[in-house]
Amino acid sequence: MSRLHLHILGSGSKGNCALVEGPQGLIMIDNGLSRRETLKRMAELGLSADDVAALVITHEHGDHIKGLDVWCKHWHGPLFASRDTLSCKENLARLPVEEFDPGDTLPIAGIRVRTYPTSHDVINPVGYRFDTFDDSIGFATDTGELTKQAIDTLEDCRVLALESNHDVAMLRQGDYPRFLQERILSAKGHLSNDQAADAARGLVTDRTEQLIAMHISQDNNRPSLTVKGYAKALAATLDDEVGSSATLLQGSRKLSIRPASQHRPATIQ
């Protein structure tokens, strides 16, 4: 079995970067960390920059591309982004990029990469699904809603990395100005815990082994709230009183639920 692995270097507003490990190396998703920090966190997971076969971008917000310019000065693999995503940034417009339209399927490093449109306040945002013959990883962050196309693409993955950005009550009662609250809550903002949990009911199948809560707000959420929301929606059992993770056991089936971290890299087998 050519099992894929998801390595999450960081997920959140202070910088996003992940890697899918497949049969021909690593596909990096976004580069929102400094080169030094990216290399440091990769080394913690036993990964090497020499094995990064390609880089794909979700959208042009700084927490997803602020490390891209420097990274590409030291790395010369193929860079993929949706049409006009990088050309809107003066310092990135000169980078050689292979553009695609959301909905296209891309053969990259031995993996079938399916793209789908997300809903965010940028030019042409996308999410990804990574498939080999017998394995799949779904990746969805920075979207205010999941369209039917997104749901159809993400359904029935073995590993599902799904945004669970904010708790609505915490956001409303917090210090964010009203305009920013409205942006986050809008259809072009971010998925709330409740939206993510509702989506997970339809996306998670008997094949799904790992559900990862992504892009958790440090101001308007807590990792335990994301885990508890997913656990309640899927009838999983919390692994401890804190809610640091949860597990669903049904016969031979096992689903693990856990949050991604902004600062601690992790490998999802």
Image: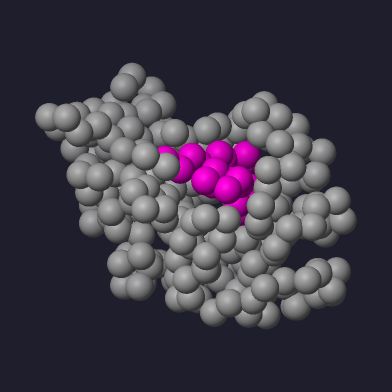
Q: What stretch is highlighted in magenta?
A: 3-30
Query: Looking at the rendering, which quadrant does residue 238 occupy?
Result: top left
Report whether 9 appears left or right of 116: right
- Regarding residue 192, the answer to whether it shows in the image is no
Report whether 208 appears left or right of 266: left
* Count of numbered circles on the image: 0
Looking at the image, the residue that sits furthest to the top is 240
Residue shown at 45%/56% (left/top)?
Answer: 130
Looking at the image, the residue that sits furthest to the left is 251
Q: Quadrant of the C terminus?
A: top left
Q: As rendered, which of 104 and 236 lies closer to the eye?
A: 104
Residue shown at 42%/42% (left/top)?
Answer: 2
Secondary structure that dominates the magenta span? strand
Note whether 112 is above or below 81 in the view shown. Answer: above
**Percent from the top left, x then y, of residue 144?**
45, 65
Q: As rendered, which of 47 and 175 lies closer to the eye?
A: 47
Q: Is residue 27 magenta?
A: yes
- Regarding residue 6, the answer to whether it shows in the image is yes
Residue shown at 37%/39% (left/top)?
Answer: 1
Residue shown at 35%/59% (left/top)?
Answer: 154
Q: As rendered, which of 180 and 21 lies closer to the eye?
A: 21
Query: Looking at the rendering, which quadrant does residue 25 occupy?
Result: top right
**Percent from the top left, x then y, of residue 204?**
26, 49
Report whether 144 appears left or right of 51: left
